[in-house]
Amino acid sequence: MTQQGQKGQLVAALWEREAKGLAGYAMVRTGGDKAAAEDLVQQTFMAAFLQWDESLAGLDAEERRNWLRSVCRRRWIDGIRRETLGDRLQADVERLYDRVSPDPAHAVIARDDLDRCWQVLRQLSPRRREVALLYFIEQQSVLRIAEILGIQASGVRKHVAKARQALREAVGGLLDVEPVETSTLREGEGEQE
């Protein structure tokens, strides 16, 4: 017989002697949850099989019983920790990713606001529209837009400020974005339409 086969027989004999008592111990731990208690017993005896040579081979009957109860208790505690962590993670996941179905009325209003934004963008001069699209849609920096279009950064800021103003007039407080610093710009500076 192989070493695994001998170990299997020894664990099976241990099961015959200790499984019933360990099941009672596990029932107390799980508050009478029979399925959870049975799972704990199975996990404990699986650990006994896996750790027989290192942990159980040299122990007497009482020491093996204590070892089984200790492992059963630790597995029970690990299960509680997993449940607690799972509950916390579940709450976090729900909080972060739970999406409420949009109110149809809000969806219609949002669609209308979006249509008005596109109308405003289409009415801008070609250069201002190009700057606005690069800035708002493609989220390019002022310096990058200046480089792409071959204009001064101050001109880009001016176009962004004017486009933002036109959009605000069309859709009110819908735009919740940081304004571009325009206080240093003079009227007409950087405009290359």
Image: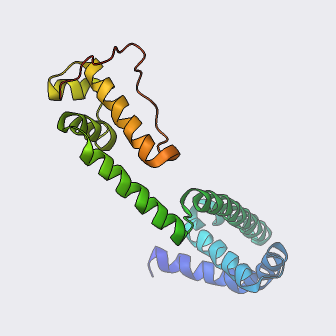
Image coords of residue 18 (percent x, y): 75, 80
Quarter of the picture containing the N terminus is bottom left
Residue 102 shows in the view: no
Q: Which residue is depicted at the point 42% across and 47% down?
A: 170
Judge left or right: residue 91 versus residue 106: right
Where's residue 11, x and y in %? 62, 78
Displayed quadrant of residue 58: bottom right
Q: Residue at x 39, y 42 (%)?
A: 167
Residue 16's image quarter?
A: bottom right
Q: Position of residue 86 (x, y in %)?
A: 64, 63
Q: Is residue 23 left or right of residue 58?
A: right
The image shows residue 49 at horizontal and vertical percentages of 57, 72
Q: Looking at the image, how many numbered discs can be counted on the residues? A: 0
Question: Colour mode?
Answer: rainbow
Q: Which residue occupies the foreground of this view, 109 or 69? A: 109
Residue 3 vs residue 80: left or right? Answer: left
